[in-house]
Image: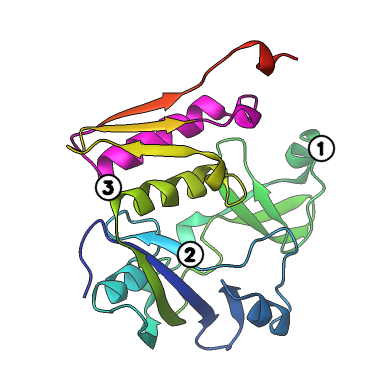
Amino acid sequence: MFKDKDFVYIDYVAKIKDTGEIFDTTIEEEAKKANIYDNEKIYKPKLVILGEGAVIKGLEDALYQMSVGEEKEIEIPPEKAYGERDPNKVKTMSLGELRKQGIRPYPNMMLRMSNGSIAVVKSVTGGRVVLDYNHPLAGRTLIYKIKVVKVAETELDKVKALLERYFGSSNVDKFTVEISNDKKEVKITVPKELYLVEDLQSRIYVTAKDIITYVLPDANVLFIETFNKSNFS
């Protein structure tokens, strides 16, 4: 059994109970069989940090009761998934207002609104557009077939897992990570090819925050960027 702050890697196939429709998976072969394959997605075991709340509650609750190598199928009711449908989240707005924003809506189109919320177009009739702000899976009971593939055991493994999360699997081995013997300092050398990566400082910030929150709460986290003439030649 696992506990808070454990770093657990899982494979899963997730489907809607009443239709059997697979809507998400970490396994490439399963995605292709279900016709949901995305060639821009990297299919690999998903990192779940227990207690982080980054996955639905029913899935996280089940993982606490599992062990490495274990596989099980679980049923997750709406209240532990994406909630019940709320009729108050179905809104109507004018077609002209959306067209002013350069949007030509059609049924089942997914829109990101100006306030950051996500809405699905339910209908477009008579100059009016019906938008549903409920999560597309609200009100649905879900079935997850999950397997615990591995766990990150050491502090070094966990730091590298966080670097992979925020910088990508192709970049994680380019970092040099040193953890002091007293575990009071984590020194991470940033590879020079990432100095100009988009949102570098934001990625550094969230990585350091998660290291302190989930791995070494008493550590100082240093990201080292070294500049010399080779950087500019």
The numbered mark at residue 214 is 3
Specify the segment rendered in magenta: 190-219
Please provide percent x and percent y for residue 218: 18, 35
In this view, 212 is above or below 148: above
State how the image is colored. Answer: rainbow
**Residue drawn at point x = 36 percent, y = 34 percent:** 208
Marks 3 and 2, how far apart in space?
A: 17 Å
Q: Residues within 10 Å of mark 1 (few under 14, many from 20)?
A: few
Amino acid type at circle 3 is Tyr
Secondary structure beneath dot 2 equals strand
In primary-sequence order, the first of circles 1 and 3 is: 1
Q: CA distance from mark 2 to mark 1?
A: 36 Å
Where, quadrant-wise, is the C terminus in this rendering?
top right
Q: Residue at x 69, y 82 (%)?
A: 34
Q: How many numbered discs, if any?
A: 3
Which residue corresponds to mark 1? 102
Front of the two marks 2 and 1: 2
Residue on which disc 2 sits: 46
Between disc 2 and disc 1, whose residue precedes? 2
